[in-house]
Amino acid sequence: MPCPALLARYPSIGGGCNGDFDVTYRDIAEADARLRRVVHRTPLQHSSTFSAMSGCEVFLKLENLQKTGAFKIRGAYNKVASLAPDARARGVITASAGNHAQGVAMAAFRFGVQATVVMPEGAPQAKIEATRGYGAEVVLTGQTYDESYAAALEMAEREKVTFIHAFDDPYVIAGQGTVGLEILEELPYADALIVPVGGGGLISGIAVAAKTIKPDIRIIGVQAQNAPAAHDSWRKGLRLDVPATRTLADGLAVRRPGELTFHLMQRYVDDMVLVSEEAIAAAIRLFLERAKLLVEGAGAAALAALLGGELAYLRGQRVVLVVSGGNVDLSRLTTLATAPKTPMGTAT
């Protein structure tokens, strides 16, 4: 990816221009300093049950217990904090299927900034109501995230407000990377991190942080089979446009990975796998039954991948599953009644 183009888009964040543009460890450390008094340092919990089921030593990074119920507050707050006072005064706008919406809404509220959030018409009602509860104006437009994204960009241009991208923004990526800092501070001997992937902001930030601290750690991304854009792009080495179909992991349903996130994933991510809808449903059920945790589809994807067979090479290793969120539309839980007891049906 040409460095000058990225520098033109992101001129105010660290990195070099010797062929590559980076969100650096320094950027993540600075985000961590901003966030320490704002977000929860979420638990890193060992799971005897999932360890026995997988043959690994399994640890859960419980971002479902984060403020707003997901990791997204980290990147959203870091971005709003980076804005100049005049930009904050004009307000912010974003597009989101739900969790980023709540993160931006809460961050804007903390700074006294007016926020507008464009969400797909089929977004979970719980996420819509939570976003409004943080004081944001919610506009329901489009059938997919990508349609909402296009509408939000038009509104940002028309109203001269700052658009906050859900993943393809260096300040957002750096904020999400603080998850990786926390994991390695608490578990420096971790062998692998399994991370759910939508547009790539979370895995990009985590990978930069983790690989800087422990270069030999494995970073593994997981996507839903019904929304495989980042997986397919990473494997082919080219950003692809892959329409997503309906998935329990609605937070991962992105049509195309970001430009900056793809660059970082290509550089730092070691493997990417897919999981089926049946595997995601079964993993949500396992979290409820065995860990007593309410986890959304995206948050359950890492467990689905670990138990699905494609990651057998991790047996005997210390593995951290990033449980990215817990904002479940309770009306969808009835689908779990017929889910199999163990996740199956993964694919490379």
Image (spheres, rainbow, N blue to C red):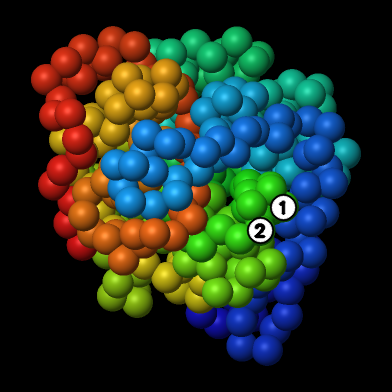
Figure check: 116 above or below 279: above
Quarter holding residue 273: bottom left
Instruction: Identify the residue at image location x=31%, y=66%.
Output: 313
Visible residue check, residue 143 = no
Q: Where is residue 347 shown, x and y percent of the image?
A: 17, 56
Evaluate whether residue 176 shows in this view.
yes
Q: Mark 1 highlights which residue?
A: 185
Residue drawn at point x = 67 percent, y = 39 percent = 74
Q: What residue type is labelled 2?
A: Pro
Rendered residue at 64%/33% (across/down): 42
Identify the element where label 1 is drawn. helix
- Kind of residue at disc 1: Glu
Q: Position of residue 317 (x, y in %)?
A: 44, 60
**Could you say which disc has been placed on residue 239 in the image?**
none
Query: 171 or 313, which lies in front?
Result: 313
Quarter occupied by the C terminus = bottom left
Residue that label 2 marks: 188
| Left or right position of 214 against 311 | right
